[in-house]
Amino acid sequence: MTYLIAFAIIFLLAVIVIQIGKVTELASKIRGEEEVELHNNNTQGKWAVIFMVVFLVGCIYSAYYYKNTMLGYGPLTSASEHGFELDSIFNVTLIFTGIVFVLTHILLFWYTYKYRKQRGTKAIFYAHDTKLEMIWTAIPAIVMTFLVARGLVAWNNIFPTLTDQDKFVEIEATGYQFAWDIRYAGADGKLGNKDFRLIDLAKNSLGMDWTDEHSVDDIVLGGTDKIVLPVDTTVRVRITAKDVLHNFYLPHFRVKMDAVPGLPTSFIFKPVKTTKEFRQQLSEYPEWQVPADPNDPTGPKRWETFEYELACAELCGKGHYSMRRIVEIVTRDEYNVWLASQKSFYMTNIRNTADDPYKGKKLFSFEIKAREQELKTEFAKVLSDSAITNTILLKHVFFETGSDKLSDLSKHELDNVVKIMNERASMKVELGGHTDNVGDAAMNQELSQKRASSVLNYLISNGVASAKLSARGYGQNNPVESNDTPEGRDKNRRTELKIISK
């Protein structure tokens, strides 16, 4: 019924317009075409002047009314160091283009009225005016030269040349339909290499090259994780894309750069306001004091829910909206705590799997340090009165295949055990060797005994009293995982330390 009424209204309006046209045509025949033309010219000229005034007033009023919601004005000042310079360039550009806009707008509609056709007037035609052409050529050229020069200076300031001696945080943003993968450099401060030929959507969606040691401590955020960055710190963002053209856009930081498949780009910026500081800045304006949710007037205010954001500024598909990510700017100390809590993608998903090129071959310095602290914590737990187990898995004790010879990598783990054992004179332990079920059970039993004895001999040779140690081989009798998979068999081949007395 609603559509029927709407159609009827449109039909009636069309009929009215047609009838008005017929009446106008009839009136022109009665008064004469020249008289009608003069009348129309006067009417259109007056309406042009009215439109000129209304439009200019509307532009000025709307600019003033919405000033606090436009980037660069009111509370929405730049949150990055370079952004203030960009805002200044935009303001200068706005002044020059605003002058041209106002003058051309006034002249366009005023001339429409002033030079309308009237009785007794005649148009004058100028074929050429050199002076006028020089004026409207020289002035724009001078203004453009000034704007371009300022822009080049700003560009050089925004993109300084960073060296290895400069202190900066480096991250990488990879856009795809419809999300961003964000990668952080780990403790070494450098992002590892990538190769599109190494992309595996299940295990390595970024194509990270694990043979590059800079990759092993890199952190990859999940799809819903916040992007956390420190304030007053230079940030370099590597930007790329997997599929179609995307755009890395941080509006509050005045950062905007295309993400192009096969063509890496980058941007450098320095945040100068934390998320909390920017929220406080917004709280000083009445339009940000309203409820964030109009349906919940008692809920948090609009300024309290503000978040910096990363958006894709290209129409990359129907799921384009879902590429929004929250960006949180924190103090340097808060950032360090957050970064320390993140796990590297390699250590979480690749380490000691079939895809690990360093499996059984190398331990990294950060891995050794972390394991030392972990081992101390495990000993503290099993020695406590509330301990639920008295056994510790020696994760970094390795043997050559089919042999009881300790790998050189085992010294890090065993040296830590020596240190802890010597700190507790009364503690006695049993070293237990375990194998998988591949091969003869008797041979596995013998091998496990020899391996446990090898660990015992290493500890004794490095200062642990022999009376505090015993060794026992369990063979294949106590698996912790199924022996039906390579991963399970790998976990079953292990060396354990059991506390006999504290």
Image (cartoon, rainbow, N blue to C red):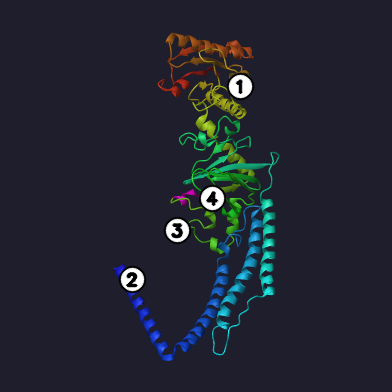
Specify the amino acid type for callout 3.
Answer: Asp
Viewer-side residue, 185 vs 44: 44
* Label 2: few (<14), some (14–19) or many (≥20) C-alpha neighbours in 10 Å: few
Tell me where residue 231 appears, x and y as whole percent.
63, 48
Q: Secondary structure at mark 2?
A: helix
Viewer-side residue, 141 vs 161: 141
Tell me where residue 373 appears, x and y as whole percent.
59, 28
Specify the amino acid type for callout 4.
Answer: Asn
Q: Which mark is residue 247?
A: 4
Q: Which mark is residue 412?
A: 1
Separation (CA) of disc 4 from disc 3:
34 Å
Specify the amino acid type for callout 1.
Answer: His
Q: Secondary structure at mark 4?
A: strand
Q: Secondary structure at mark 1?
A: helix
Separation (CA) of disc 1 from disc 4:
46 Å
Residue contact between numbered discs 4 and 3, judged by CB atoms under 8 Å: no
* Residue 120, picture quadrant: bottom right
Q: Nearer the viewer, mark 1 or mark 3?
A: 1
Image point 50% across, 41% down: which residue? 222
* Label 1: few (<14), some (14–19) or many (≥20) C-alpha neighbours in 10 Å: some
Is 114 placed above or below 233 here?
Answer: below
Q: Earlier in the sequence, mark 4 or mark 3?
A: 4
Residue indicated by mark 3: 296
Magenta segment range?
319-324
Residue indicated by mark 2: 6
Q: Is residue 19 left or right of residue 32?
A: left
